[in-house]
Image (cartoon, coloured by chain):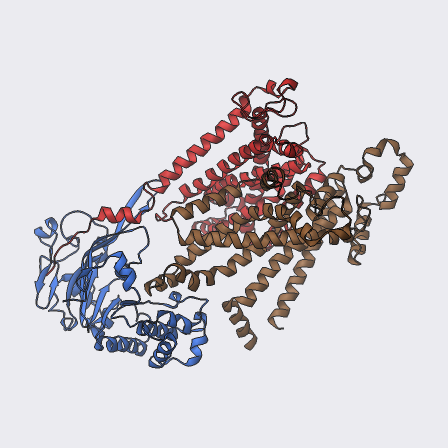
Amino acid sequence: MTRVMFDSVARLQTRSAVYPIDYKRRSLLILLTAAALLMMLIMAGWLTNPDALSVQLDQRNLPPSFQHLFGTDWLGRDMFVRVMKGLLLSIQTGLAGAVCSAMIAAVLGIASALFGRQADRIITWLTDLFLSVPHLVALILVAFVCGGGMKGIVIGIALTHWPALARLIRAEAMQLMAAQYVQVSRRLGRSLFWIARRHMLPHLLPQLTVGLILLFPHAILHEAAVTFIGLGLPPHQPAIGIILSESMRYLSSGMWWLAVLPGAALLAAVRAFDVIGSHTKRLLDSQQYERL
Amino acid sequence: MPGWLKFAFGKSVRLAALLAAVSIITFVLISFSPVDPVRAYIGADMMTVGAEQRLDIAVYWGLDQPPLERFLKWVSSMIQGDFGSSMIYREPVAGVIAERFWYSLSLMAAAWLLSGLIGFAAGSAAAMNRGGWLDRVIQWVCYTIASTPSFWIGMLLLMVFAVWLGWLPAGLGVPAGVAAEQVTIADRIRHMVLPAAALSIAGISAVALHTRQKLIDILDSDFVLYARAKGERGWQLYRNHGLRNIALPAMTLQLASFSELFGGAVLAEQVFTYPGLGHATVEAGLRGDVPLLMGLVLFSTLFVFTGNTAADVLYRLVDPRIRGHENDSRNV
Amino acid sequence: MSLLQVENLSISFARYAGWLRREIIMPVRQLDLALQAGEITALVGASGSGKSLLAHAILGILPANASLGGSILYKGEKLTAARQAKLRGKDIMLVPQSVTYLDPLMRSGAQVCLAARGGDPRKLQRAAFRRYRLDNEVEQMYPHQLSGGMARRIMAASAFVSGACMIIADEPTPGMQAEDAAETMKWFRELADQGHAVLLITHDLEAAVAGADRIAVMNAGMTVEWLPASHFSDKGERLQHPYSRALWNSLPANGFYVPQSDWRAVSSREGPGCPFASCCELAAAICREEQPGMREGERGWVRCHAS
């Protein structure tokens, strides 16, 4: 009655699996590539010779060439060196802001779960409050209050970027708080601080790390934006925002490389951070079915 | 109390609390600022202005009084609709904001609609072809746009379309050297195209990625499985179930993105020297125009709040589940 | 000839078990089944035994990461993806189990209209509403306004208007009151009497025995026995497979006899031999060495060495 009929299982598998190699290995590969690219950018910023930034009037306004990869500006300064140094500065500023922001998010998110309903309501309201002013307006306000400079930007980024991450951490911490082993710890008379340190932090660390990495791109872009406007880093520092805002004056003169290449370098750095963040998230997402 | 009245009351209380909190924080921040408003006001003429004159200016702005008194005075006049005078434009703040809001409004509305429509279409197309090449291209483009400084997009557009091709004006809201009454609508639109394009490109990726994710969730749902079992597929499936179920979340997201829209407008207006609110915000920050800056902070808060409230209202009007719930509770 | 014949069907998924380690899980490993026009066939198995996946495999709506083995024949011809796309909703129709299968933002009348084939959708839908005793106002209701009973009628009406000759009902009766369940079974009996083939996927053996013509018993992703429903009687003397007997005798009406061993503990076992060798009371040496083939008995077949 029954004919045993085997379909070629292998053929069906290739039809249904869209990615030829499994995507976690692929994620790891992409992540490492992005990290390598980023390291190269940072190393370039560190190692390039600052002598190339000196004014050389006989080398003015040169388009990109092998000698000057990104060309030179109206003072004969090598744009590649300027951009790499600027990128390093932007990344540092962005990192400082993002780290502060993630710490605020962690503290508030955990506090929300730890200190009961009243504290949670206050923190939730605070979160909504900080989301209700456009980031850039808040950044301009803080930068103005601090009188410009690095300090203003770092404080501004720290104060504006935490709410989204804080919400994530809060939700996760709430779940942890309801977990049985945390409840048992509480009955055993453990202090809230002990619970936060022993039970919460270790579990929240992966989320927090991914959240922090995914904050970098925003932080760096906002740093560049505020500096571009003229409220950020002072003009004598070669931040990317400064380079781009200076190039505005030369847009009509056909010196495209002054605007295009620095912007593209910034884009590459930001995108690398974004890729690292999202693929780390994918890798940490264990027990996930292979789906697209 | 009818549902909508309760809703409106709740929203008003929230708005009042929000504006109060934002004004207090802003005021405290500014009063701790090392920037001397008088110095900022006088600017380069500092050397030529004597101490007495400086004191006069301080008295004129009310800067000689203690902060708390200044704050109360500011709040009480604000409640009467007087937001003070802008130092740089020498006009009432309310007037400056109102005038510039119209420039920004047309710019932001155009960009909002455009980015919403393009983003929605792109996100839908990506999700319907999940895993395919179109999906990957759309995702790649969206993630790249999300990593791109929006002012740089503006600069590229400016270089290509204004400098290189010469199709469109490079900046300002109206042609230079033309009397105000001679400016035509066409002129205004021509000046708005590039900033609006820059602003909408920056806004596309969020809508597209969000729409894609929502639609994928819908496509994985039980009811789409059943619809597919019934033989629906492709465009028909999208029209019958996809569109119906993602239109509202997408609209909501787009309304909730007023904050990014305003931030984007600040940068786009800066690149194209377009005389809108964003440009005014930058000027106020750069030149220490405290009354204007505070007015703009409050106004942008109100703007963002309006978007969020509109999203809530839309949900209550359109979603039959919430609508039905309202009716039920009224009947009880 | 059977309308639908499922032979040695297996369904597997790849998933991550950790950071990078992948594993293949195979919820369905050896599924055989035949469906006759004019009959109700019940596929009975415990929850989680992979029954619902069969419905999705027949319709070709498994998730993209699923792999299939074995074959499904419809009207004697292989059911390919292209053929499935053509037959879905037209020849083969699904009756899902709960209200979550209805579009929450679409009025129920419109949802039934969408399923209609061969004729004016509106007229078909009205006729189906009359047949399943649904008021005209229900047309305008959204799923969240429907009662559980109304939702089931809507889905039955959808199957009716499709005019499909094969109906797959996924868990149609669980959690229902006795009279509701009886009414639901009556609908399927009517359809079968009109010449439809009905596949009833359920974990409720009692309802299956009462309502179906033939029963396939499934455990751990395998059909262990396929036989007429009438063989489930008395103490199960006419049942061939020990699992079927254990299942039948564990019913409240048959004395709640609880088997000594846990039949579900085997589901992940790999290797040669009968997968139930470790928990079967009748297991002999051969059961551990050789996988049992299918043996034909009176009006059915069984996959067991011992029977």
- In the rendered image, the quadrant that contains the C terminus of chain C is bottom left
- In percent of width and height, residue B59 lies at 88, 44
Letter of the chain in brown: B
Image quadrant in which you'd find residue B148: top right
- In the rendered image, the quadrant that contains the N terminus of chain C is bottom left
Q: Going by the image, does A209 lie left or right of C258?
A: right
- In percent of width and height, residue B235 lies at 40, 60
Q: Please, is residue C168 above or below residue C263 in the view?
A: below
Color of chain A here? Answer: red
Q: Is residue C64 visible?
A: yes
Q: Nearer the viewer, residue C233 or C136?
A: C136
Q: Going by the image, does A16 lie left or right of C277?
A: right
- Taking the spot 38% from the left edge, 69% from the top edge, the residue there is C114
Q: Please, is residue A83 above or below residue B90 in the view?
A: above
Image mark count: 0
Q: Is residue B21 visible?
A: no
- Taking the spot 43% from the left edge, 36% from the top edge, the residue there is A31
Color of chain C here? Answer: blue
- In percent of width and height, residue C173 lies at 30, 71
